């Protein structure tokens, strides 16, 4: 029997309709690519969003068509975030930091019909646009006075010209909330980037969950600055969450240096912000050097990679802002967990609170998590057992866009295999211990490569360490420890292995140690274990005989 | 094009699954009907909920079947709240304060197959159960030691016996989130009570919206006590909101006196509670008499009727707890608005903040509101124009259960006409000025009966006042003022009317004044205007000639 409740779909257009109707005088402040600070209100934004929807309609953009963006966090990008999905098309945010061949692959794979590009990112677009035959037009997100010329792309369209003259009267279409709203590609270490195709429903439900007091905790009295780029999973959903709540928004544009970020934090009274740790290091360095403080910031969400404890302590103790870890993935819209304490943690000491804060946190309602072993058997939630994390929920990816087979989606029907290896405790608090590709599978049991590395770098003569699994005839895989010694050190294998005494179970002990001059890294400084596994693919362990 | 996101339905069972999995050690504390305080955890509750689901399955309860409850806020009622919808049946909460003939009508109209009843409400069930031929069994919510006997109802079932021996292993079925979950009848002043049939989707989305920082603002660190009864629109959704967030719950059972409520507030560390004003008056009186304070309570939501300003000030200034008005209806699951300030209100004086707090507040995201005139034309959001409030959203009723025609649902397609007359300002802040049945429709324009009454009672010789519209040959309706004078007063009509000088537009002035000895009231003390309109149906105004 069906309930007798109105069938009102959860659409992205309803977010800005709500904000314009009830928070029409609240500001959206934006540092522009052109330079100056731009400020207007939700009412102004909604008018221009509707002009843009009319302009896109006039260009022939139809329901389901993909419209790309290559842009920073500005008010024009914000307008595209609502106009494109609002009219039923798909907003495809593209990460300008990818390699040119990846960008070319993505734009063609997505069949983007139009591309919106920021002034200073046009040179990037010029590298791939000529190789994208389905691309009908490139819109530069600026006004006529700043319009560049391009020798490569013919007939650049000026954003302000595009919307100028179009009516700000537009009735948002009503359609199935399961329809696609947005597309974001994620690039792994191998293979082509893969597209996650979000739905209106996923974005709206994710916004509800993200706004809750135990998640981002955003109210209409907050001033929210997403530093995380709008080309990274919808800036973690923050523009949608903030619009849902009617909070003031501050969009930092392209300038990510400490001085520029600090200027906006203090000048606009920002209370909530979110970014990756690198940005916070820049900000901390700036504030310490310039002896500046933070007078309004209350809450900082950090994701992407783990936040050093010293940074959490600096923000908490010196600047009065609480730093919380969040964990998620493009495939999760992106929020999975956030590290917010429970009632029973009220009595913890400061040290214990920071210990707790180092983990990835507990799941939002809507996200189901479990850890499994190689055979798919669920492992206990005891904070000790670790296994691969599987997730499901109404904002979790069910397949990649136009990809036939996906091991992550096929590992267990109805679940998504995250590739992270972690522990869960009885309250769902999650701690990542490894990536599933890096964990060493020895005789059906798992050994954490990260744990072994962390112990090794604790040795005074070790500069850097990596642990990989290499083939073993009996145990399938066994750990091999690779060490970069500190200058002048003549550390020996037996001395190194003895350093593990009492720190690990004896069967975790690496089967061999190789001293190397350097270890390979990715562009962002992470260990490139795929290369190490290739290099040591045929390595014969001394125990293999 | 459909998004590629998992199709995970929003089901009530997922709320308690989430709480048991991640907040399993958090308490649910309950004052029982038998007397003692009962305490257990979400883990314990979930086990018993699953036992109950198995027991109901064994009784033959099937998807869509209605199961009635006549019960206070206790842990057993909480279990029914999850077991019945969780298994796909419909939890029909019945208000024991209705008249026996209404109860009989409701139970038969709903075709309840089973009825769960609290010990001290059995005498009420005995009055209507024999006249409910479809009722197959009555379950008394107690253990064997407390089981009563009934001369009227044969084969009473004992709750604890019912679930005892059933397994606590039960796989929650997965079905369409639009399926009915709960049924609650609303009784107007005329006609039979009408049933609102909620869906799983409506309850879960409502819980998201209600938990947000600008609404109830409930986190896992809160201790939540719904004093509003679980037979009033699911206790305003609070048991579901609280379970979603994993907060500790305190269920006050049948005892509503100041001492009992205060004991739980202080003894359990309650931080959030919600009730109608009557309960707070009892609590305030108790605290003043006993010189007691409140050490943990932060937030109080008041709904049902307006909270006197003096009470808001007492809680805020004397006891440190913020009182917020909420407005809603059974037809809205029930939340429509909540009175939470905006960022721009930060500079208001204390007096201005309390002025603001007297209104009904602003809409939650998800609720669309507009005010219209008699012809359905939308009126401006200027805080002055008043019209009938229409609402729509994903938790708003689309029709009454098994009722063919509903004027409230048919007034404008896709909207629900609330029957409230109000103003809206540019931020959506709503103030109720009248009920649509009471507003006086004079020559196509509306006159607020409540405004005229409020001015009249400001006259020192007026004890009570009522204003109704009576027939007028030219203007359709004109206001008639009914006055109960204070003892000893000989206030005259012309003196009374002169009192309105400068306070209203001249065309609002009542056409006549009738002095009466008393005015009729409802059981809850509200003016019974239907009776007044009947009594004065044929009244001839002096202006009608």
Image: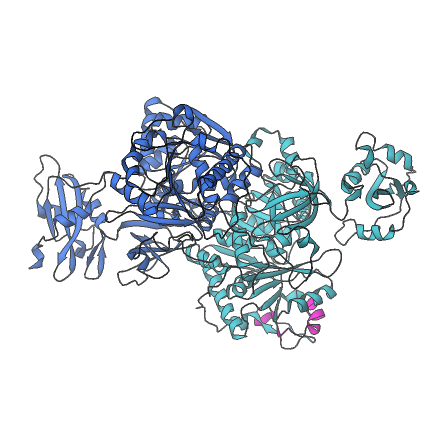
Chain colours: A blue, B cyan
Quick check: can you spot residue A498?
no
Q: Nearer the viewer, residue B438 or A148?
A: A148
Left or right of residue B31, residue B501 in this image? right
Measured from the top left, where is residue B404 in percent x and y? 68, 62
In the displayed structure, B103 sits above or below B354; it is: below
Q: Is residue A326 visible?
A: yes
The answer to whether residue A124 is magenta is no
Image quarter for residue A317?
Answer: top left
Q: Looking at the picture, how far across and down is residue B195, in whole percent? A: 65, 60
Q: Is residue A200 left or right of residue A137?
A: right
Pick the front one: A521 or A109: A109
Q: Nearer the viewer, residue B297 or B233?
A: B233
Please state the horizontal and vertical placement of residue A452, each as a whole percent of the image. 20, 48
Which quadrant holds the C terminus of chain B? top right
Where, by quadrant of the figure, is residue A491 drawn? top left
Q: Which residues are magenta?
A: B123-146
Taking the spot 71% from the left edge, 58% from the top edge, the residue there is B187
| Camera-side residue of A139 and B448 | A139
Q: Residue at x 79, y 33 (%)?
A: B505
Residue B16's place in the image compared with A275, above or below, is below
Q: Residue at x 79, y 43 (%)?
A: B440
Residue A61: x and y in percent read 44, 43
All told, the count of numbered labels is 0
Q: Is residue A394 left or right of residue A153?
A: right
Is B126 within the magenta? yes
């Amino acid at each position: 029997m069906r309930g007798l409740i109105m069938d009102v779909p959860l659409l992205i257009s309803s977010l800005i309709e709500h904000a314009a109707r009830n928070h029409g005088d609240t500001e959206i402040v934006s540092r522009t690519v052109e330079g100056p600070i731009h400020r207007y209100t939700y009412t102004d934004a909604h008018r221009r969003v509707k002009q843009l929807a009319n302009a896109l309609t006039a260009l022939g953009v139809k329901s389901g068509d993909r419209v790309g963006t290559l842009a920073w966090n500005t008010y024009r990008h914000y307008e595209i975030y609502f106009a494109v999905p609002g009219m039923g098309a798909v907003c495809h945010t593209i990460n300008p930091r990818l390699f040119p061949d990846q960008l070319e692959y993505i734009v063609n794979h997505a069949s983007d019909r139009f591309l919106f590009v920021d002034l200073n990112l046009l040179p990037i677009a010029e590298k791939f646009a000529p190789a994208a035959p389905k691309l009908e037009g490139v819109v530069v997100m600026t006004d006529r006075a700043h319009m560049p010329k391009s020798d490569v792309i013919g007939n650049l369209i000026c954003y302000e010209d595009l919307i100028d003259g179009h009516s700000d009267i537009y009735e948002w279409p009503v359609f199935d909330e399961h329809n696609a709203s947005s597309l974001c590609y994620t690039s792994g270490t191998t293979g082509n980037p893969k597209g996650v195709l979000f739905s209106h429903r996923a974005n709206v439900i994710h916004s509800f969950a993200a706004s809750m007091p135990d998640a981002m905790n955003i109210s209409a009295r907050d001033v929210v600055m997403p530093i995380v780029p709008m080309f990274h999973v919808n800036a973690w959903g923050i523009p949608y969450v903030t619009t849902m709540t009617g909070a003031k928004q501050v969009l930092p544009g392209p300038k990510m240096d400490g001085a520029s970020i600090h200027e906006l934090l203090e000048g606009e009274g920002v209370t909530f912000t979110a970014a990756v740790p690198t940005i916070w290091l820049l900000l901390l360095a700036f504030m310490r050097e310039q002896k500046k403080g933070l007078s309004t910031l209350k809450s900082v969400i950090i994701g992407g990679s783990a936040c050093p404890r010293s940074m959490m302590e600096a923000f908490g103790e010196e600047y009065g802002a609480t730093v919380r870890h969040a964990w998620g993935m493009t495939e999760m819209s992106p929020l999975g967990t956030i590290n917010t304490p429970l009632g029973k943690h009220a009595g913890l000491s400061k040290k214990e609170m920071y210990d707790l804060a180092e983990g990835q946190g507990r799941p939002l309602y809507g996200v189901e998590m479990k850890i499994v072993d190689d055979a798919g058997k669920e492992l206990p939630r005891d904070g000790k057992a670790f296994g691969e994390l599987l997730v499901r929920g109404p904002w979790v990816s069910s397949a990649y866009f136009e990809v036939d087979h996906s091991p992550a989606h096929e590992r267990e029907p109805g679940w998504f295999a995250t590739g992270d290896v972690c522990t869960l405790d009885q309250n769902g608090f999650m701690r990542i211990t490894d990536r599933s590709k890096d964990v060493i599978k020895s005789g059906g049991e798992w050994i954490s490569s990260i744990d072994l590395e962390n112990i090794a770098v604790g040795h005074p003569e070790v500069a850097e360490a990596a642990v990989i699994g290499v083939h073993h005839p009996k145990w399938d895989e066994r750990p091999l420890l690779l060490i970069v010694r500190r200058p002048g050190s003549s550390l020996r294998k037996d001395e190194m292995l003895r350093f593990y005494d009492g720190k690990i179970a004896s069967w975790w002990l690496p089967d061999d140690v190789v001293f190397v001059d350097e270890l390979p890294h990715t562009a962002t400084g992470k260990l490139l274990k795929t290369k190490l596994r290739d290099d040591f693919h045929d390595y014969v362990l001394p125990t293999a005989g």
